[in-house]
Image: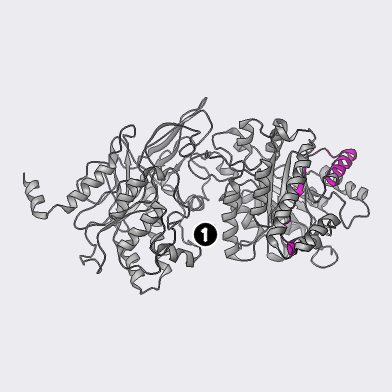
């Protein structure tokens, strides 16, 4: 097992880890889109952090063996990104077709971390069983996917002895030279260091010579193999300096998490565990919890000694794809720094070509990975303003089960949340109501996701919880709602985003929704889309037990002064957009003119408007919003079952409606619009005709 490392030439004490705010914000994986540091390459982020004294951490993961494991790992990326790692790295497994498009390949896992999770990512590349041409092909593919960092390794032999591949490389130094020769300075290159010398080296001194060759060939920094005693690392760093190695060296930290995983890792790395550690572990080897707790204490003690030395600018953790132990160590060290502020109101991608992107249609606010997927072939991305979008080329979403798009919850959990059996449309209402309230459903299970949003209810949506509950329980099903915000500080823990010292604004409420109505259309109250029905399309009565309903998938949006809507025909005192699955798009908003619904004002910057309601994009979102009824919910049930028929009926007969209250400084008018609509619908037909005659 080859591993790696980083220790800066400039000493800093452990207490100086706070650094400047701009330094820390700019070098988190998800860097603020409004800051120039978003454009920095990894080695520049490291240099800036070292100059400011900010400590950092990074994480290593390996590709899982199954598609389900891949989906779980992507969810773990999202969870661990919250702590602010400077980067992650993904290992290369020659036996697992690592350069392929398989969802379990090293290439795809690394690409997903970068493009869909917004993480600065290093892809391992080894010489094992690869010819020069194959390596070059993998590097070209990595570049095309947006990856800019490579960890160049010889790699572990498949058998007991290393076998040289004809036309390939036998040493990491040759691989580094090849990368620089073929790709110039495009990639930042990391190499492995061995604090006790590589097990195959003739001596420690001989191994240092090989390490110096790798650095001289063009490596930018080093990550070390794991070790258990701080003095081992200190001796290594001093020996590197004496050899003329001046690049950063990052220590590799392995929190012991179990007896079997420790033995396996020691076998692969050919390292010896210190006797004092063996003496503690042997008596508790069958108690994983006890070993993990001991491993956490051991790692915390080691890291504190390393950080206090002033030789270590950051720490690199071998996670074994687990999060508990590493997260606990980082929290105790004060390096886990969850920032409640979002760089932008939506999740950014770390792909180099999206560095300028700072505007998106709000419809995909809850499905950012889907938006990135559907726009991955764009050559340019909106910056500053959305502009004229009369013909945006959104890619078609055909596969709702890509490992980075599928739900994190297994089918069994979804059925517990959304219902093993649906009796009527009210059963659907109840699911939405329990999602909003956080209360367990009638079977004792909490609803933590919906087909349009795989995450629990957003904090800002909770500001409207009571109003949303009221309308959802009556059949207006909201999904993506944002409240009116008029000049809240950008540091606000609920609605804040962007650099500190600014103020943010929102038009609301915004969301998507769907619903069935008798004889006239029904408006939604919150947001970007709502599905409503004006009678049944084919003139048939609804299925037995299916009362009137209105559903909103998750989104936000709106056009100009007052409330806006897009809807089926029918007089409504506000503006918006409404459309059935198949049929006419009706609106009282200006056609093809985007409307900013979120914006921010920050010191020394122009006004930023990161989310808009765009009429053309709405039509592309419409197809996805309708399809999710079937793909995520309907297909949980047998094809001819009553539950499947209820979901199919909703899919076939509802409208998607987008509403926005443009008078955001005033009390929200859309709740009253919904109340008035319910009153209108409940009015006897005769009295309504009489009132119209007046």
The residue most toward the top is 604
Where does residue 251 sit, x and y in percent of width and height?
77, 46
Asked which secondary structure carries label 1, the reply is: loop
Residue 180 visible in the displayed image: no
Answer with the quarter of the image where residue 34 lies: top right
Q: How many marks?
A: 1
Where does residue 312 sit, x and y in percent of width and height?
77, 39
Give the side of residue 53 with respect to residue 652, left or right: right
Q: Is residue 70 above or below residue 328?
A: below
Foreground residue, 556 or 492?
492
The residue most toward the front is 283
Q: Is residue 591 above or below residue 417?
A: above
Foreground residue, 51 or 393?
51
Give the side of residue 26 with respect to residue 469, left or right: right
Where does residue 226 sit, x and y in percent of width and height?
79, 52
Q: Residue at x 51, y 50 (%)?
A: 372
Colouring rule applied to residues: one colour
Quarter of the image with the C terminus is: top left
Where does residue 272 sit, x and y in percent of width and height?
85, 58
Give the side of residue 385 with respect to residue 50, left or right: left
Give the side of residue 188 with respect to residue 230, left or right: left
Report the residue marked by disc 1. 408
Quarter of the image with the N terminus is: bottom right
Q: Is residue 654 above or below residue 420?
A: above
Q: Residue at x 79, y 66 (%)?
A: 158
Residue 38 visible in the displayed image: yes
Give the residues in magenta: 232-261
CA neighbours of label 1 inside 10 A, class few (<14), some (14 to 19), many (20+): some
Foreground residue, 430 or 407?
430
Q: Is residue 54 magenta?
A: no
Q: Is residue 241 magenta?
A: yes
């Amino acid at each position: 097992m080859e591993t790696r490392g980083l220790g800066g030439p400039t000493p800093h004490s452990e207490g100086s880890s706070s650094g400047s705010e701009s330094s820390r914000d700019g070098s988190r994986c998800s860097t603020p889109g409004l800051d120039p540091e978003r454009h920095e390459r990894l080695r520049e982020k490291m240099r800036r952090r070292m100059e400011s004294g900010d400590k950092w951490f990074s994480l290593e993961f390996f590709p899982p063996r199954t598609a389900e494991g891949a989906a779980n790992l992507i969810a773990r990326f999202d969870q661990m990104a919250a702590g602010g790692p400077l980067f992650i790295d993904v290992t290369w497994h020659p036996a697992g077709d690592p350069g392929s498009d398989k969802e379990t390949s090293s290439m795809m896992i690394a690409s997903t971390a970068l493009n869909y999770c917004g993480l600065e990512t290093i892809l391992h590349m080894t010489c094992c069983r690869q010819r020069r041409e194959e390596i070059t092909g993998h590097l070209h593919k990595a570049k095309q996917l947006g990856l800019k960092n490579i960890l160049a390794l010889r790699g572990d032999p498949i058998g007991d002895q290393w076998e040289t591949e004809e036309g390939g490389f036998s040493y990491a130094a040759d691989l580094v030279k090849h990368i620089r020769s073929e790709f110039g300075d495009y990639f930042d290159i990391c190499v492995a260091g061995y604090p006790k010398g590589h097990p195959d080296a003739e001596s420690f001194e001989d191994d240092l010579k090989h390490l110096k060759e790798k650095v001289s060939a063009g490596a930018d920094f080093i990550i070390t193999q794991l070790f258990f005693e701080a003095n081992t690392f200190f001796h290594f760093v001093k020996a590197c300096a004496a050899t003329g190695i001046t690049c950063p060296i990052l220590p590799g930290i392995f929190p012991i998490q179990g007896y079997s995983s420790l033995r396996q890792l020691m076998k692969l790395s050919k390292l010896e565990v210190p006797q004092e550690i063996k003496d503690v572990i042997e008596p508790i080897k069958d108690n994983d919890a006890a070993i993990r707790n001991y491993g956490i204490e051991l790692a915390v003690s080691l890291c504190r000694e390393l950080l206090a030395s002033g030789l270590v600018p950051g720490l690199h953790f071998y996670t074994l794809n687990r999060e508990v132990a590493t997260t606990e160590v980082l929290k105790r060290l004060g390096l886990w720094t969850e920032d409640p502020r979002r760089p932008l109101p939506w999740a950014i991608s770390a792909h180099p070509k999206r560095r300028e992107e700072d505007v998106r249609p709000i419809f995909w606010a809850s499905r950012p990975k889907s938006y990135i997927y559907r726009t991955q072939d764009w050559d340019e991305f909106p910056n500053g303003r959305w502009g004229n979008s009369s013909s945006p080329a959104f890619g078609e979403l055909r596969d709702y089960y890509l490992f980075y798009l599928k739900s994190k919850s297994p089918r069994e959990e979804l059925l517990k949340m959304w219902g093993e059996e649906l009796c009527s449309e009210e059963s659907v209402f109840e699911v939405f109501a329990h999602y909003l309230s956080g209360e367990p459903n009638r079977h004792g299970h909490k609803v933590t996701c919906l087909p349009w949003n795989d995450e629990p209810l957003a904090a800002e949506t909770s500001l409207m919880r009571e109003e949303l509950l009221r309308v959802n329980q009556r059949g207006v099903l909201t999904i993506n709602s944002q409240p009116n915000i008029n000049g809240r500080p950008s540091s606000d823990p609920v609605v804040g985003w962007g650099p500190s010292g600014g103020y943010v604004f929102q038009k609301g409420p915004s969301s998507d929704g769907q619903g069935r109505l008798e004889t006239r259309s029904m408006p939604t109250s919150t947001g970007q889309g709502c599905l409503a029905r004006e009678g049944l399309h084919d003139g048939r009565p609804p299925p037995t037990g299916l009362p009137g309903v209105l559903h909103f998938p998750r989104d936000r949006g709106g056009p100009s002064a007052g409330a806006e809507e897009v809807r089926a025909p029918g007089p409504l005192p506000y503006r918006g957009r409404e459309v059935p699955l198949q049929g006419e798009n009706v609106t009282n908003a200006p056609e093809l003119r985007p409307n900013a619904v979120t914006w921010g004002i920050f010191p020394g910057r122009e006004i930023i408007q990161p989310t808009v309601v765009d009429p053309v994009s709405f039509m592309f979102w419409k197809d996805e919003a309708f399809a999710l009824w079937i793909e995520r919910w309907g297909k949980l049930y047998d094809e001819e079952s009553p539950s499947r028929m209820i979901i199919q009926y909703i899919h076939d007969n509802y409208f998607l409606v987008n509403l926005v209250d443009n008078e955001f400084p005033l009390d929200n008018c859309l709740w009253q619009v919904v109340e008035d609509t319910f009153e209108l619908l409940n009015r006897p037909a005769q009295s309504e005709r009489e009132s119209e005659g007046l």
